[in-house]
Amino acid sequence: MFIAYLTELLRTAYKVPGEIDPQRSFLELDVDSLSLAELGAQLEDELGVTVEEEELSAVTTVAQLAALLEARGAVVPA
């Protein structure tokens, strides 16, 4: 559920090119720390779930971030 949401967000808002493999690291996807911080703020705005910078640094893949959001009880916006 969140994997599709996050990959679309990375593709459109953060201009990650090509197919996004949820198991690849953010580093491999060329998503830098500034973009991750912006992503965290965007997720808080859109989902109402706080993801601290330390948590974003600890999760290294889209799949891990999706699992964190699900564990927090976030809901994908319609």
Image: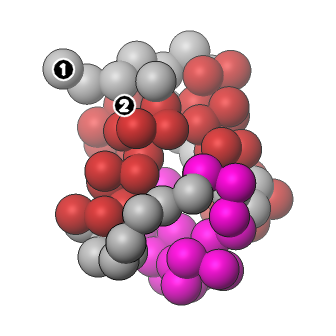
* Magenta-span inclusion, residue 33: yes
Say whether residue 19 is visible.
Answer: yes
Under mark 2, the amino acid is Leu
Q: Residue at x 22, y 63 (%)?
A: 12
Q: Name the quadrant of the C terminus.
A: top left
User: Pointer 2: what residue?
Assistant: 47
* Magenta-span inclusion, residue 3: no
How many neighbours does mark 2 have within 10 angstroms: few (below 14), some (14-19), or many (20 or more)?
some
Q: How far apart are marks 2 and 1 (CA)?
A: 11 Å
Q: Residue 29 carries which label?
A: none
**Relative height, residue 26 to residue 21 (above, below):** below
Q: Position of residue 71 (x, y in %)?
A: 68, 21
**Relative height, residue 45 to residue 11 (above, below):** above
**Relative height, residue 57 to residue 77 (above, below):** below
User: Pointer 1: what residue?
Assistant: 78
Q: Residue at x 30, y 42 (%)?
A: 45
Residue bounds of the magenta highlight? 22-41
